[in-house]
Image (cartoon, rainbow, N blue to C red):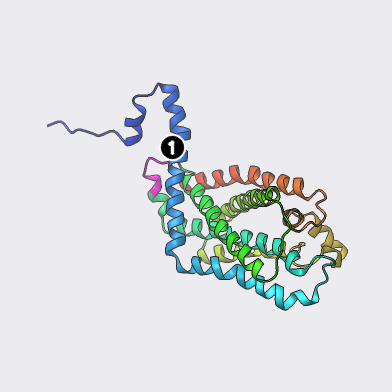
Amino acid sequence: MAETTLPSPRVADNAFLSPPLAECRSSVFWLISDSWIMTKRSTMHIVRSLDQVLSLILFPIMFMLLNRYVLGGAIDTGEVSYANYLFAGILIQTLAFGANYTTINLAVDMKEGVVDRFRSLPMSSIALVVGHIAADLVRNVISGIIIILAGFAVGFRPSASLTEWLLVIGLSLLFTLAISWLSAILGLLVKSLEAAQWVGFMLIFPLTFVSSAFVPTETMPKLIRTFAENQPLTHTINAIRAWLVGTPLGDSAWLSVVWSIAIIVVSVPITAWLFRRHSVQ
């Protein structure tokens, strides 16, 4: 008896489409479909991982309380209360550290051979990375809500309109997306899980503390101040702070958008190249 070979689901679905439409569906439709499946997979890891849930809740609250009540009394922020000054810094710090899970989770998938197993399936090669980054967005949205509640509890009193709140949300999501793509590069470069756990902190830690997140940059030495006032986190923090509590906005809004888009434009092709190179190896 002749052996019957069943077509793959993708071949069967494309059989009724004209060649150009089938090709288009293969490259775009399946990328979105596969990325959605990988996003659900990565999001389920958040729910099932106790350490991720605890860090999601405790980490932002701990930093909010420490800075507000331990350091806040020694820092002069002028007419703006320290609770109002601190909120934007804690928010961006939490989003930046949250993106480090992309580094860790990609490194885990590489080490455990999950990437090689997915390669044997008819799926878009970059969907795994997109899934991790989309899960980062979900994780950071939850962290952002927790930060807002904690901020109100320690005296944060915003004066933002609905439009300004929408600008804050949009810029925060764009910033998270940029840092997540940068973290994906780190996840594909590290050789061990131990390295994945500290390499992200080595990048984010100095960027958050050498910025306007917790203290005004005017108090810093000239060289450090120059770096702090021109790096992307400071522009993002200053823009969010201006929208929320009415501090001077300056050029921070458009500069923070330019920084985030530039990071994404550079990081996406590098991530795709590193992922394909790993897959070939």
User: Is the residue marked by circle 1 packed among few (<14), some (14-19), or many (20+) residues within 10 Å?
Assistant: some
Amino acid under disc 1: Trp
Q: Does the magenta stretch include residue 165?
A: no
Q: Quadrant of the N terminus?
A: top left
At x 59%, y 50%, the residue is 181
Direction from residue 183 to residue 119 in the image, left or right: left
Query: At 45% across and 68% down in the image, what residue appears?
Result: 50
Q: Where is residue 78 in the image (x, y as percent from the top left)?
A: 85, 67
Q: Give the range drawn in magenta.
A: 118-123
Q: Looking at the picture, does residue 131 appear above or below residue 197? A: above
What secondary structure is found at the residue carrying circle 1?
A: helix
Report the residue marked by disc 1.
Answer: 30
Res 97 → quadrant: bottom right
Q: Is residue 280 visible?
A: no
Is 44 or 183 nearer to us in this picture?
44
Percent x, y of residue 252: 78, 50
Q: In the image, 274: left or right of 266?
A: left
In the image, residue 98 above or below residue 30: below
Q: What residue is rendered at 38% in x and 50% in y?
A: 117
Q: Residue at x 77, y 55 (%)?
A: 242
Q: Which image quarter: residue 197?
A: bottom right
